[in-house]
Image (cartoon, grey):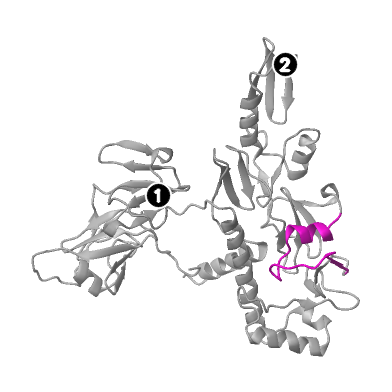
Amino acid sequence: MLYAVHPHALCKPTQVVKGPCHECICREDGLFVCHAVPCPLSVVNPRKSSKDECQPHVTYKYEELLCTCNYEGRWGSFNCRETFRYLRSDNKSVKRDLKSDYIYIFSNQHEIDHNDLPEIQDGESCVQGKVYKMLCNTCQCGERNKLMCTKMSCFENTIQTALRQAKEESDKKENKEKLNNGVLPKALRQVKDDEKKKVIKGVNSGALRKGSSKKKLLTLPKGKCVPGMIYSSGCKKCFCDDKEKAKCTRSCSGELPNRFSDKDISEMETRSVIDLPELPHMGAKCDPGKSYYVVCNICFCSHKHDLICTMKYCIDLDSATNVQSKELTGRPCKKDFKFLCADCKCVNNQNQCKPIPNCGNHMSGKQLLSSAAGTNMKLTLDIQKEKCKPNVSYKFHCNECHCQPDGSLRCTQKICLTYSQAKDLQDRETYLDKHGL
């Protein structure tokens, strides 16, 4: 929650805590689920508390009771203290780092590599306490033979779906607020009165609901348009540039109405990326109606100063250079040479290549394009058409991805904020600080 001063924390899956009358195990969603164990009857004073009764900010569930621990490690209610008294870690529990490929078992101080684990599929039976791998995730068989797994993204379209859903939610919220306040979007003033009624009717009837196939774009007006706005012209999508002129797709466009596909953008923006201004990331502020080159993607700037970009994965030059250096080393040669960020020496007629440290960290997208000209280095990855190169890393907007030896792509699942979303978050944080919340 945005307004929470201390957001709730998540426990580590399979972690065990115990109290006088209860034992709890951390579920895969970060919630402790508890069950009663035999204990002696005693009277508890619920008003008397002490620190370390529970794990700060973590939530515990027992039957229909949900209890949250405050920042001091004290129960948030008398009922919770009377029920649990205290719940503390069991040192024999299995702990894990959810961002790594290893499970650490402290009872015998040894590591289990993810690649050495037995494979298991969702729904298959497991042996309680045993550790498995499911695609790129690590799982342990918990109580009642239920698998508890890490939640890394093993499929590329997970991130794309999350990004699109976040964008839809943001647009939905903004449109509802404007209509509730009686403030119509600026673009509505560019269309005829009867078209206004259609748009408003569509919004009030739920046409902007997430995933709704009834969501409609504004019809492209005659004459000037609003820079950064997306319109429809028949079955085609159009984008209004900074000169108040619309450029439209050459073919009918499907998919999400408020988004452009890579094909849509390539049909509307025909200039070379060398001719486009450059921005460092998709959260940067832009000028409505303009086109930009961002790392390796072409982007349009919306009327809200947000970037709408193609969805290519951009290669991480340092990781690609490491792989390339290993491939080049040992090959026959006649002289020393440099290949992008690899420095190769010809020793005894054989290449000895080493990557130049941090060579790609300070290169902009255009500089990288220029450096790679004339080489066979592919700087982008289209996951719809090709597989990634094993052991090479990629960047997908604000997410980091790493190609596994089997050619599958493992990525983080952060939601990348646009400029308006980041500004809204900053404004709310400023408001909270100003009012001491």
Q: CA distance from mark 2 to mark 1?
A: 47 Å
Q: Which disc number belongs to residue 13? A: none
| Residue density around tag 1, few if under 14, some if 14–19, many if 20 or more, within 10 Å | some
Does residue 282 appear to the left or right of 246 in the view shown? left
User: As rendered, which of 225 and 202 lies closer to the eye?
Assistant: 202
Q: Earlier in the sequence, mark 2 or mark 1?
A: 1
Position of residue 235 in the picture relative to residue 76 (left or right): right
Please state the total of marks drawn on the protein image.
2
16 displayed left or right of 266: left
Q: Residue furthest front?
A: 124
Is residue 220 inside the magenta stretch? no
Q: Give the main secondary structure of the magenta stretch.
A: loop
Under mark 1, the amino acid is Ile
Looking at the image, is mark 2 or mark 1 nearer the viewer? 1
In the image, is 50 to the left or to the right of 115? left
Query: Considering the numbered disc 1 on the image, is that residue within a helix, a strand or a loop?
Result: loop
Residue behind mark 1: 120
